[in-house]
Amino acid sequence: MSKSALKILLIDDDRMQFRLTQAQFRKIRAEAYELEWAETYEEGLEKLLSGAYAACLLDYRLGDRDGLELIQQAVGQGCRTPIVFLTAETAKRVDFAAMNAGALDYLVKGEITPRTLERSLRYALKLGETLEALRRLATRDQLTGLLNRREFDRILAEESERAARFGRPLALVLVDIDHFKRVNDTHGHPAGDEVLREVGRRLGALMRSVDRVTRFGGEEFALVVMEMDRAMALETARRICAEMRRSPFRAGDIELPVTVSAGVAVMPGDATDGKSLVAAADKALYAAKAAGRDRALAFGDL
């Protein structure tokens, strides 16, 4: 396999179909693709969710189960790999069902040629890139690259519901840049933008992969912190404050000392749902700023 070869996953319970597909790939460009095979629904789903493949060819029939179910399950678990549906049927209902489930294209097995196979893969890969770019625009803050307010609202609703259902702790940390207006007024908005980007970068470096770092709005950031009680979340917020004051920020040739204030709230102790969790964290943040800024306070300690 060359370094530029794309890994393609075939999920099909028919070994003969795998060999036929291998032969089709050899007639395209052997160095452009590497085909791997999953023979069962379970193996195929596991490999697909690994994120290790550029695209997937998925058969309609997988023993007692079908590819439509697999697509829906994979997409429901966050799979973004472009999927091309393979079917022996030409009925439009199958085509529409596959596309509605999340497939980006489909091929009828008896009509596949090396040319149509490569064309379908190229189409799915390009469309997948476009959809990912649109998804990023819809969920990411353009300036910092962090998750945006809309995505924060969605994540908090899901995680607060899960925390309430299973009785698990969930913490929210609201972080606000101290005297941010002064940065814009004194050094200009480009310097302010650099400060926002650097705060976002430092927050991302501090938090765990399971947590969610978002730009809440303006100079305020919101961190959805999984499985942390009040003491642990407050310690995390204090580390954030320390990290921001540790070294000055650079905006061009200018060095700027930057500090932040943070408010912490947790479920179930401080709130019963996402809305009340935000309100509690906001009160703690306001108290931290009123107490002199550059510090973190927890709602439960007010």
Image: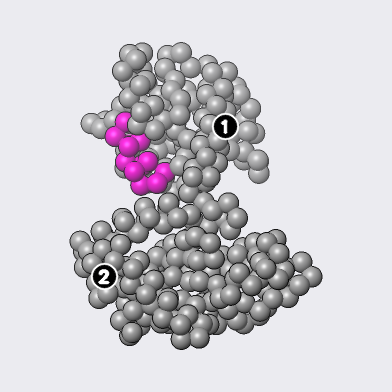
What amino acid type is highlighted by mark number 1? Lys
Please give the label number shown on residue 271. 2
Q: Is residue 77 above or below residue 193?
A: above
Depth check, front residue: 238 or 113? 238
Closer to the observer: label 2 or label 1? 2
Residue 75 in the image: state x and y as whole percent. 37, 41
What amino acid type is highlighted by mark number 2? Ala
Image side of residue 47 versus residue 116, left or right: left
Q: Is residue 105 above or below residue 163?
A: above
Question: Main structural element of the magenta stretch: helix, strand or loop?
Answer: helix
How far is mark 2 from mark 1, CA to CA? 45 Å
Answer whether labels 2 and 1 touch (C-beta < 8 Å): no
Q: Which residue is mark 1?
A: 126
Residue 182 in the image: state x and y as whole percent. 64, 72
Q: Mark 2: give few (<14), some (14-19) or many (20+) Cα within 10 Å.
A: many
The mark nearer the N terminus, 2 or 1, is 1
Image side of residue 121 versus residue 192, left or right: left
Depth check, front residue: 149 or 21? 149
Image side of residue 129 versus residue 234, left or right: right
Q: Which quadrant is the N terminus positioned in? A: top right
Q: Residue at x 53, y 69 (%)?
A: 203
> Element at badge 1?
helix
Q: Residue at x 33, y 68 (%)?
A: 279
Q: Mark 1: give few (<14), some (14-19) or many (20+) Cα within 10 Å.
A: some
Give the residues drawn in magenta, as a range: 68-79
Image side of residue 213 versus residue 168, left or right: right
Q: Which quadrant is the C terminus positioned in? A: bottom left
Q: Residue at x 54, y 66 (%)?
A: 219
Please give the label number shown on residue 238. none
